[in-house]
Amino acid sequence: MKVREVMTRNTEFISPDDSLKHAAEVMRQRDVGFLPVKQGENLVGTITDRDIAIRAVAEGDDPDRTRVSEVMTKGCISCYDDSDLTEAIELIQENEVRRLVVKNHSDAPIGVVSVGDLAWDVGDDRLSGAVLRSVTRGAGHH
């Protein structure tokens, strides 16, 4: 099975110059806790609801004035839409992340695949459990 068969399409992207308040509003509207960050056509990082809460709000930063770039995780772990699910699982395990940005072969981001997507669709309960356990160990990561 290929990543394109389980990924979430129509992913919302956010700019590093956007405010944290705007990022949180987009997350609420889309009912997601993760947004890839693009500057122009380039992926430059990711931001999660946890980043906003822990790296900004808990520190007393003003969500209206604090920019996404100040709290986002720089860089982005990604895979291609035609990657096998096992490749995506390996990337998630190796990098202790919960989500991968999915790109086409022009390197344009086209979606996101999460541990949940993979756990439901791998069809092997033991493998699903192993994926979830390995990622849970990296609970402070995305």
Image: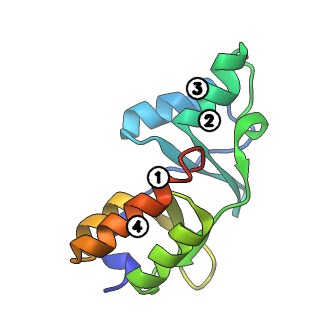
Question: Are there few (<14), some (14-19), or many (20+) residues within 10 Å of tag 1?
Answer: some
Residue 79 percent across, percent down from the top left: 55, 76
The circle on residue 12 is none
Q: Quadrant of residue 55?
A: top right
Figure quadrant of the N terminus:
bottom left
| Label 2, label 3: how far apart the Cα atoms are | 6 Å
Disc 2 residue type (three-letter) = Asp
Residue 23 percent across, percent down from the top left: 57, 34
Q: Is residue 3 visible?
A: yes
Disc 3 residue type (three-letter) = Ala
Disc 1 residue type (three-letter) = Thr
Q: Quadrant of residue 51?
A: top right
Residue 46 percent across, percent down from the top left: 63, 50
Q: Earlier in the sequence, mark 1 or mark 3?
A: 3
Residue at the spot of label 3: 53
* Residue ID at (53%, 35%): 49
Question: Are there few (<14), some (14-19), or many (20+) residues within 10 Å of tag 3?
Answer: some
Q: Is the C-beta separation of discs 2 and 3 under 8 Å? A: yes
Residue at the spot of label 1: 136
Residue at the spot of label 4: 131
